[in-house]
Amino acid sequence: MKTHSGRAAAILAIAAIGVALTGCAATGPDTGAEGYTIGFISGANNEWGSCLQGGVETEADALGVELLVANSDADAAKEVANLEDMISRGVDAIVLNTVSVDALEGGIQKAKAAGIPLYLVAVVPKSLDDVMGATIVDLGAAGGLAAGWIGEDADGDDVTVAIIAGAPGASSDYVVGGFRGALPANGTVVAEQPGMFNRGKAQEVAENIIQANPGLDYAFVLNEDMAFGARTAFAAAGRPDVKIVTMNGTQPGLQAIEDGGFAATVGDSAHDLGATSLENAVALLDDPAGEKVFAMPIVLITKDNLADARPFCG
């Protein structure tokens, strides 16, 4: 989820769900000949994406939209096939959470050639000319929130920080870039390794990091599933006091904050992102002159404001 500065689109977030292509007929008041049929194509298979799909499906039901769902499973070629299949089904619009910048470029052109509006989830292209719109998550700002909290918590002391990133590529790069750019001068990044959005891999990475940096003060881990792996590694190394800042705001993650396992998390409701994306796509079908880009709110959650966290999965 790759930074390609010269490409047609800049990925701000990529994550998605895992189901085979299915039809999900909604039962709202506008179904039937006058109702919309919208295709939702997702990029990969994980908890974030499952919750994203749940939000899309909930909103489709509320709006009376017939929803067709496909999963590209992190495969750019499969994304192209899914787009072609949605086009062949004659959908009114396609809501797309893309696999990669390269896949997105081709997808935009295929939808344009077919005359089908394309609405993007968690991405924003440099030019909006060929897409209907986008609902985005500012991942650079999310990384900045995490870095800002470390700066405040360190209170001027010199501290060491490790970064356990996701998979090399766009979403992880944007988060890490925002984090590094906002980290104050008294914070020194002593290690950065990818955890591949996998708990076991993140635990292995954390074991290596704490062995090489036994005095580590903070770890910024790019999602809560990986953060639980890091927590296990630090505890096993006799360093349960390493403060972990992470991202998502899942129920287990919030519980870990309450219990003291995590210090903070940047909450971004995947369910709300999915629901808002579909809502905005339908609004633009009704009124193409409406607002094309909407940025989802994010919030830093600690023990002091747990009540402010939006439900991650609805």
Image (tube, rainbow, N blue to C red):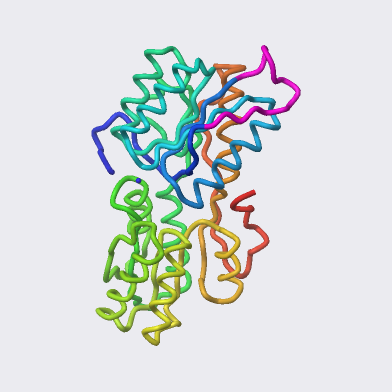
Q: In front: 199, or 162?
A: 199
The magenta span reads 22-36
Overall secondary structure of the magenta section: loop
Q: Quadrant of residue 291?
A: top right
Q: Within the image, what quadrant is residue 305 found in? A: bottom right
Locate residue 224 relative to residue 218 in the image: left or right. Answer: right
Residue 20 position, x and y percent, is 48, 37
Give the residue drawn at x 27%, y 43%: 3
Residue 186 visible in the displayed image: no
Place of residue 103 in the rendered image (x, y in percent of width and height, measured from the top left): 32, 32
**Is 24 one of the magenta-colored residues?**
yes
Q: Residue at x 39, y 79 (%)?
A: 234
Q: Is residue 11 above or below residue 254?
A: above
Q: Residue at x 40, y 75 (%)?
A: 156
Q: Is residue 262 above or below residue 235?
A: above
The answer to whether residue 251 is magenta is: no
Q: Is residue 264 above or below residue 298?
A: below
Q: Please state which of residues 294 and 98 is positioned toward the viewer in this rendering.
A: 98
Looking at the image, which residue is at 43% across and 76% down?
A: 232
The answer to whether one can see residue 61 in this image is yes
Q: Quadrant of residue 281?
A: top right
